[in-house]
């Protein structure tokens, strides 16, 4: 549940928008990308959101169908246009975003009365984004959907902090904590967990999330890898190496693989390893939604990473040297995750996130 829209990415990397001659068009919006990513593994997915009554809304619905994502819960806002997001692509770690979500994004006009709470309760996983809490009526609807998701095997809150959508971190923290009361899985990078629980220390952040009732806390640390803590203990894995092209979709690929791993009943270490690999694959591609990997591609990436790791150990026995090499070459699901490396800009008149 949450954001949807159209991503317009430069056809060439390393070119600022004033000099871009052509853009490629993709389905976008973080929760939507997560749904696409999960569908790549054969999971049945749907997205609860709204689009505008315009050609971009028509495109979004068509793209959802092509990716195998059910659009029956996608409403139409007759008053607001489908959002568009532009980006600039400067590998390896600079991906400025420019959101056009005004006068108000349709996904922020979802009302609690619109929800099919029976369908939400029947899902095995319900995934919600914190961005849905930044404005009414979406805030009330998101909290109502989270409450309806209690029968689900997993209720995941993506901490997805977009500062331009909020008045400030204090406001965000208040509503994030309201939402965390319903979640048993929380996923965020260091900026996002700091907003949620007031610390950037990965282990302390994971502890605070779990003290709030979260069963599985996943903290993405960029080049330092990913820390995941659940009732069985903690897992901390380094990123999978990759030559970065565009890191913007890496976190969403991580999310789709996380869902698949949880539903597959894999051990936590295997879940995170697969999610890291999925994030690395997408970071090595230009697009987001259409770049989401299949299970076979994730398997191949894991094998490649294992071989590279073995080679690094042979040529550089010093673990410090090996770690530096991996950190420079690769990203985890968070290195270019939303709000970490990318600069994000809201056009004038959109500072309120609308």
Image: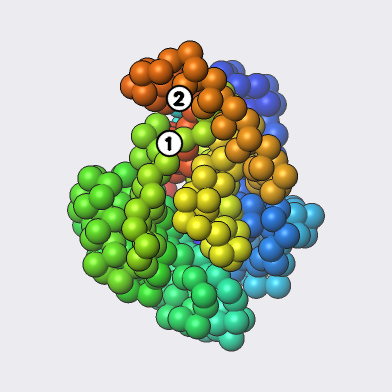
Q: How is the image coloured?
A: rainbow
The residue beneath circle 2 is 326
Q: Nearer the viewer, residue 176 or 205?
A: 205
Crowd tier of the residue under label 1, counting other residues whose Cα lies within 10 Å: few below 14, some 14–19, many 20 or above: many
Number of labels in the image equals 2
Residue 178 location, x and y as percent?
A: 30, 71
Res 54 visible: no
Q: Secondary structure at mark 1?
A: loop
**With 248 as the anchor, is 147 left or right in this view?**
left
Q: Which mark is residue 238?
A: 1
In space, the residues marked 2 and 1 are separated at their CA atoms by: 8 Å
Name the residue at 60% across, 59% down. Answer: 260
For the C terminus, the quadrant is bottom left
Q: Which mark is residue 157?
A: none
Residue 264 location, x and y as percent?
A: 60, 63
Please, which residue is most extreme toward the bottom here? 118
**With 181 as the anchor, is 21 left or right in this view?**
right
Crowd tier of the residue under label 2, counting other residues whose Cα lies within 10 Å: few below 14, some 14–19, many 20 or above: many
**With 74 as the anchor, is 321 left or right in this view?**
left
Name the residue at 56% across, 64% down. Answer: 265
Name the residue at 56% across, 36% down. Answer: 280
Res 210 visible: yes
Residue 28 location, x and y as percent?
A: 61, 48
- Of the image marks 2 and 1, the number of the one nearer the N terminus: 1
Is label 2 in contact with label 1 (beta carbons under 8 Å)? Answer: yes
Say if 350 sits above or below 214 in the image. Answer: above
Q: Nearer the viewer, residue 78 or 2?
A: 2
Residue 293 location, x and y as percent?
A: 68, 44
């Amino acid at each position: 549940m949450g954001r949807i829209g159209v991503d317009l990415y430069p056809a060439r990397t390393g070119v600022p928008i004033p000099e871009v001659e052509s853009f490629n068009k993709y389905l976008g919006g973080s929760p939507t990308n997560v749904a696409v990513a999960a569908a790549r593994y054969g999971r049945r997915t749907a997205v609860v959101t709204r689009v505008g009554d315009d050609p971009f809304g028509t495109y979004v619905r068509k793209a959802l169908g092509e990716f195998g994502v059910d659009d029956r819960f996608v409403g139409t806002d007759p008053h607001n246009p489908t959002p568009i997001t532009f980006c600039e692509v400067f590998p390896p770690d600079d991906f400025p975003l420019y959101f056009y979500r005004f006068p108000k994004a349709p996904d922020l006009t979802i009302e609690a009365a619109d929800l099919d709470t029976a369908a939400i309760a029947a899902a095995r996983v319900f995934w919600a984004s914190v961005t849905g809490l930044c404005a009414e009526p979406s805030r009330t609807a998101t909290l109502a959907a989270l409450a309806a998701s209690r029968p689900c095997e997993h209720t995941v809150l993506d901490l997805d902090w977009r500062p331009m959508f909020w008045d400030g971190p204090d406001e965000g923290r208040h509503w994030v904590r309201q939402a965390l009361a319903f979640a048993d899985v929380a996923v965020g990078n260091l900026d996002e967990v700091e907003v949620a629980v007031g610390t950037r220390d990965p282990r302390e952040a994971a502890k605070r999330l779990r003290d709030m009732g979260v069963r599985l806390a996943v903290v993405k640390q960029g080049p330092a890898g990913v820390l995941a803590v659940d009732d069985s203990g903690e897992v901390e894995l380094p990123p999978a190496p990759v030559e970065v092209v565009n890191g913007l979709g890496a976190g969403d690929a991580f999310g789709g693989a996380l869902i698949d791993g949880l539903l597959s009943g894999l051990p936590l270490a295997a879940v995170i390893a697969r999610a890291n690999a999925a994030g690395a694959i997408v970071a090595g591609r230009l697009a987001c939604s259409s770049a989401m990997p299949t299970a076979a591609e994730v398997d191949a990436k894991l094998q490649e990473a294992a071989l590279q790791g073995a080679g690094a150990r042979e040529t550089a026995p010093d673990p410090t040297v090996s770690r530096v090499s991996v950190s420079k070459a690769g990203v985890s699901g968070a290195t270019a995750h939303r709000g970490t490396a990318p600069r994000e800009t809201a056009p004038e008149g959109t500072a309120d996130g609308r």
